[in-house]
Image: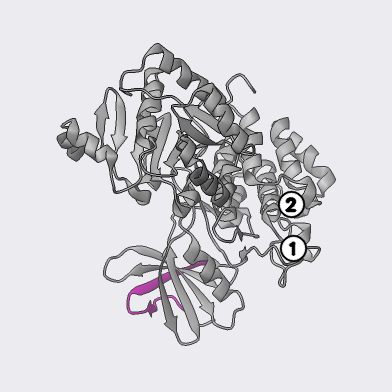
Amino acid sequence: MVEMTGKIIGGKYQIVDKIGSGGSGEVYKAYHIHLKTPWALKVIPYENVFAENELAVLKRLNHPAFPRVVDVVTENDKCIVVFDYYEGPNMQEIIDRYGRVDEKRVLKWAIQILDALSYLHNCFPTPIIYRDLKPSNLIVLNDDTVKLIDFGAARQFNESKNDDTIYLGTPGYAAPEQYGSGQTDIRTDIYNFGMTLFHLLSGIHPLKCNEVQMKDLLEDAGVSKDLISVVLKCTAKNPDERFISVEEIKNAINLFSNKIHFMHPAHPAGKNAVEISVSGIQKGVGVTHFCILFGMWLKNRGYRTAILEYGENSDALCLCRLLNKESQLMKKGYYEVRGLDIYPSMGIDKIDGFRRSEYDFILLDYGIHDEYVSRLMPRSDVRLIVAPGADWKIRAVSSFVERYDVILKMPNTYLSFPMQDRKSISVIKSYFKKVNILALPYAVNPWKINPAISKEIENIYNRIFQVGNS
């Protein structure tokens, strides 16, 4: 390999240091020569069979856990990919320096990793299987935010194939099927995730023990029995004995961990605020109205609550003008009505960078549901999709359910109908038997909630957060 330190790439990026080797090339730290901003550069020889695949995967990603590709430079026989540089140790370096990691911190990281995997596995039109999850591919920033790097081993899932053409993975973390016993799929990433958790919790590399010893080593490290059960199920040799999805893992963790249990929503692991995503299958079904109504109910219960509006066609901004709150919005970046904080027209970048630690609950108003919103909503703890309940709208709702069946089948996802009595909801449930159905109340003035409406919202809260059922 030719010495790269000091070289200027594409007339813009000066390499200052080699920071590692990825699955398909060498990785360097560089600075933009004019802006002085740091970037990571991956130098990939064109003859590398993984180069085209990795670039194709990276271009599809739009999630805060993954690096953004900002430039691609071609020089001689090399493809040089420029993406975000993250300042912080990887989890392997943390283990090497401090040994095993405290269970609470591991859980905080685990939820973020599961959110990232959920995004990959729900990519449209084809899921992405990462296949090389391990501590050295997980960077921890100063605020304990986790970033997942190196997509050299990732593949776009093809259910028509019985096995993989090329077997990839890291010994100790790789699942049995990665050695040729079958095709890798979502459960492969679940195995990798389980082995990563084992290493973090025990401080022992998976290659230094066998499956029989894992339980004893985790018990010796003081890991809770419930989390041990999760790790062992993730790492079952037979894929059919593992969890079937990362959502199922999150649900299992939610049942035992006060850190992220909905009964204690003020400090969920990895986010600091419980996120409730709300979208509508069409305009005018009451998405913003419900966000205000539910937000006020949560605020009245003593929870620090914010509404974050995603879209540019801003109902929240119109409301701001109507209430003469423009000066407050200009000064603070949000406006407040009766103790409820409202952030209009945020866009995905501002939502991703939002200071979640300041709130107990965040309601994400996504407006009209589409393919892109379907990719964003799985990151939240609860998803409500609002639909019209009128008889003549059933066909449109049926088409929506058929098109977006993947997200509607996710745990903690509800197809929600405003202003429906029990009889109407029963009829709606008869049409959509495989979907969670929720009836939403309507208040003429969502800022002032009467006792009857408050009781209805309390019933919704108890259902979606499983209060009394755990």
Does residue 229 appear to the left or right of 379 in the view shown?
A: right
Whether residue 57 sits left or right of residue 191 in the image: it is left
Q: Nearer the viewer, mark 2 or mark 1?
A: 1
SS at mark 1 in the image: loop
Count residues near mark 1 (Cα–Cα under 10 Å), then give few for <14, some for 14-19, many for 20+: some
Q: Position of residue 469 (x, y in %)?
A: 64, 22
Instruction: Name the one closer to the observer, 86 or 89.
Output: 86
User: What residue span does the magenta drawing correspond to?
Assistant: 4-20
Residue 383 location (% of width, % of height): 50, 38
Above or below, 455 relative to 323: above
Is 376 situated above or below 463?
below
The residue pinned by badge 1 equals 183
Callout 1, which amino acid?
Gln
Element at badge 2? helix
Q: How many marks?
A: 2
Is residue 223 visible from the viewing direction of this image? Answer: no
Give percent across and percent down for residue 238.
Answer: 81, 51
Q: Which residue is mark 2?
A: 206
Q: Earlier in the sequence, mark 2 or mark 1?
A: 1
Colour scheme shown: one colour
Between the C-alphas of marks 2 and 1, the distance is 22 Å
Residue 357: percent from left, percent from top: 41, 34
Residue 6 belongs to the span the image colors magenta: yes
Q: Amino acid at mark 2?
A: Pro
Question: In the picture, which quadrant includes the N terminus?
Answer: bottom right
Q: Residue at x 47, y 19 (%)?
A: 456
Q: Nearer the viewer, residue 79 or 451?
A: 451
